[in-house]
Image: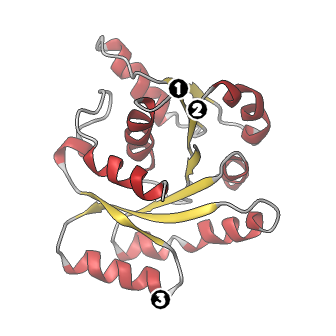
Amino acid sequence: MRLALVSSKGGTGKTTSAVSLAMVLHRLGRTLAVDTDPQGSLMSWSEAAAEEGNPLPFTVVGMATRDVHVRLADLGAGYDHVIVDTPPGDLGIIRSAILASATVLVPVSPTGLDLNRIRPTFEVLAEIGVSHPVEVGVLLTKVRRGTRSAKAARGILAEHGYPAMNTEIPLAEHFAGAFGTVPAIAGEYWELLAELKK
């Protein structure tokens, strides 16, 4: 699987989702996680886990460049799965990450601000999709189950034609406090992986 987590907005759950997906994919084959964010959140996560004596069980590399797709053609060849975590705002790096991937997930929390900021991401996806089609899904993150905000978010996504995944990532302490650790609970990410493989 070659998958990028993409959003032009920060704070949507890209890095948490990248680590959690890499954890479940690692159990199925050799996995590489690529941090393309100049702020290096994924690299910081990996370093913090290693310093605590419990390193992440998959390979993590930093690659905050606009030629990620070129570099990963060779580097990613020895891996069964490659997960790419992208920065907010840097459209050059985001474009390159999309070109390196077959599947793109767009994490978004069910708030008006996040949903309002999703359009630039889909504009880039539409532009690239002409020459490099990818499977795209919107992943609702930080969801309070059964709330009106979650239902309203799905309505807004449908209204704009954005393809929402059925799987939702809950607003949960085990995700919120996972930074710098090897995540112990990844249940929803197993569900997400099953949905992606359909």
Relative to 64, is 181 above or below? above
Q: Amino acid at mark 1?
A: Arg
Give the residue displayed 48% in from the left and 56% down from the top: 196
| Of callouts 3 and 2, the N-terminal one | 2
Residue that carries the numbered disc 2 in the rendered image: 80
> Residue 19 versus residue 10: which sits nearer the camera?
19
Which secondary structure lies at badge 2? loop
Q: Where is residue 134 shown, x and y percent of the image?
A: 66, 60
| Of callouts 2 and 1, the N-terminal one | 1
Left or right: residue 34 versus residue 77 is left
Q: Badge 1, how many Cα within 10 Å: few under 14, some, many 20+?
A: some
| Of callouts 3 and 1, the N-terminal one | 1
Q: Badge 3, how many Cα within 10 Å: few under 14, some, many 20+?
A: few
> Residue 198 versus residue 134: which sits nearer the camera?
198
Relative to 91, is 129 above or below? below
Residue that carries the numbered disc 1 in the rendered image: 30
Which secondary structure lies at badge 3? helix
Q: Where is residue 162 shown, x and y percent of the image?
A: 52, 77
> Residue 191 versus residue 184: which sits nearer the camera?
191
In front: mark 3 or mark 1? 1
Which secondary structure lies at badge 1? loop
In front: mark 3 or mark 2? 2
Real-space Cα distance between discs 3 and 1?
39 Å
Real-space Cα distance between discs 2 and 1?
5 Å
Numbered label tally: 3
- Which numbered circle lies on residue 159? 3
